Amino acid sequence: MLLSKVNYRLFFNQNCSLCKCYPACIDGLCEGCHADLPWTLFACSICGLSRCHPSQPCIACQKQHFAFDQTIAALEYRFPLISLLPSIKQRHSLHHLRWLAKLLATRIKDLDTTLPDALLPVPMHTVDQLRRGYNQAAVLADELGKNTAIKVMHTRLCKVKRTHHQHDLNADQRRANLSGAFSLRGKLPKHVAIVDDVMTTGSTLHEIASLLKQHGVERVDAWVIARTPQRDHD
């Protein structure tokens, strides 16, 4: 028996993942919520911060060196991300990562950049992951892999040292905190992307990218849902 047009719409149409009020039409969101998101505009290709001249690195990136070669962030870390992303970690709201991954995948495709050969989620220490029950970066990487047809390597990058929360530390303390925190297992392709939910100062991504390049990786991209709009907030 064929479904009626009304029943077909009720069965297949999903409401917006944010407001829940209107049918989703763009990457899981209604038009209004999609338009109201804090999109990154004219972002620096290296650090991912919004800048006036995206054709060249921002002044800060011209003065300092990041080990990663490119950052792609779909959004700035503002409302509603400042409440939504913590809820993914603290309240197991993993379903949000599905539409957030679609937004990021769309942004990547729009930039028409060279795609990596593999995705590496930022790992958690085993103790911390057991306590939480999952690694949101790994879940995000899996969703991105589905949207981009890129292989996700879950076991190559490991976190071997438990670290303090970065937001409580200054720049020197962050570097010391992350020193020796990660290790590699097995070979990697020449071009990879590190996947995480939020990029703040870039300390974690820089540490991982440095390790990858020491082991023969030639290009490292950073793919994140959101980028904090200011460098001095970690």
Image (cartoon, rainbow, N blue to C red):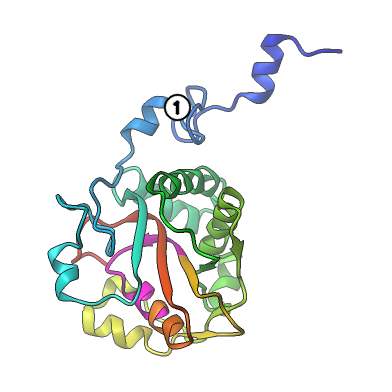
Residue 177 x/y as whole percent: 34, 85
Magenta stretch: give its range.
195-208
Numbered marks: total: 1
Note whether 62 is above or below 160 in the view shown.
above
Quadrant holding the C terminus = bottom left
Q: Toward the viewer: 229 or 130?
A: 229
Classify the position of the N terminus by image quarter: top right
What amino acid type is highlighted by mark number 1? Cys
User: Is residue 6 among what the camera can see?
Assistant: yes
Image coordinates of residue 216 in percent, x first then y, are: 48, 84
Q: Check disc 1 and report its element: helix, strand or loop.
A: loop
Residue 118 falls within the magenta-colored stretch: no
- In the rendered structure, the answer to whether residue 55 lies left or right of residue 227 reads left
Q: Quadrant of residue 218?
A: bottom left
Q: Residue at x 34, y 61 (%)?
A: 71
As for residue 199 lying within the magenta part, the answer is yes
Examine the rendered structure and indicate whether residue 147 appears above or below residue 46: above
Quarter location, residue 231: bottom left
